Image: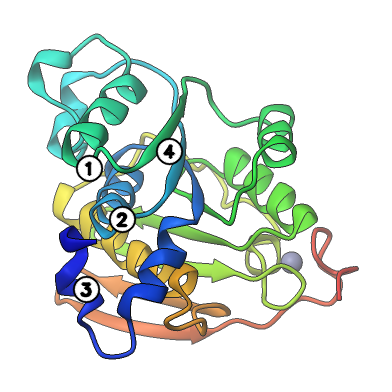
Amino acid sequence: MEKYNRQISHPGFGDEKQARLERSTVLVAGIGGLGGAVVWSLVSAGIGKLILVHAGNLDEPDLNRQTLMTHDWIGKSRIEKAKETILNFNPSVEVEAYDFWIDENNLSSLVQQKKIDFVIDARHNFKERRIINEVCVNADIPFSNAAMNALEGYVFSVNPGKTACLQCLYSEDPPSWDPFGFSVFGAVSSTIGSMTAIQVIKYLSGYYDDIFGVLVNVDFTDLSSRRFKLKRDKSCLVCGGKQ
Ligand SMILES: [Zn+2]
């Protein structure tokens, strides 16, 4: 517990909330610029267990934002390196790593087999985001969407059946979305990732649970931010039937 003294000493936090964090399991889909930053903050805060899902090997252009990686790892599995970096930094954390992309079957079976308290959606395409949304809503698992596009970033969290889901917000995909067609600054993805992580830390520890139903948008051109209160769509194809 000594490792976490500086956060345990925060008024209203304390040993009991730290212990709740250490009993929690988070699945993170996407360990790139965003997901890697979420993971880094969760690991330093003393999360109990991480289930990481990310496919593929490290390429040189990943290195402007993927801070769990190292230059000597180019050409090798990113998820393996992420696990190694995490365990070197904080060996108290339990890590399971899966080298595949999210699909309905593999995410559903992970959710059924494991005790997952929270999910992070840090993917760069709407296909996987919609799968994560639907599986989490059906399984009643709260989750956060972390997203960015050039100098803009977004965070919003979903409490299934209680607050708006991704489908309520975007009933259709934007036309001609290219998952690799936008620029990325590492400082943008790491800031949005850290903002997402503090939401999860507050919620899972029991320190503050009012994290749902609001979309926070940050414009990194001038560092302005806006908060949008989200309304559920009663006819939503994913969560409309859920109370
Ligand atoms: Zn919905």
x, y percent for residue 49: 44, 44
Asked whether, in this view, residue 104 is left or right of residue 203, the answer is right
Q: Where, by quadrant of the figure, is residue 89 drawn?
A: top left
| Residue at 33% over, 69% down | 198
Q: In this orientation, which residue lies closer to the viewer: 215 or 193?
A: 193
Say which mark, if any, is on residue 30: 4
Q: Give the class, few, some or many, for how many residues have Cα within 10 Å of label 4's Cα (few <14, many ≥20).
A: many
Q: Is residue 221 in sight in this rendering? A: no
User: The residue under label 2 is which amino acid type?
Assistant: Gly
Q: CA distance from mark 1 to mark 2?
A: 8 Å
Comparing labels 4 and 1, the label whose residue is closer to the camera: 1
x, y percent for residue 228: 49, 84
Asked whether, in this view, residue 105 is left or right of residue 60, the answer is right
Q: Secondary structure at mark 4?
A: loop
Q: CA distance from mark 2 to mark 3?
A: 10 Å
x, y percent for residue 214: 51, 80
Q: Secondary structure at mark 3?
A: helix
**Residue position marked by numbered label 1 in the rendering:** 90
**Residue position marked by numbered label 2 in the rendering:** 46
Comparing labels 2 and 4, the label whose residue is closer to the camera: 2
**Residue position marked by numbered label 3 in the rendering:** 7
Q: CA distance from mark 3 to mark 4?
A: 27 Å
Quadrant where the C terminus sits is bottom right
User: The residue under label 4 is which amino acid type?
Assistant: Gly
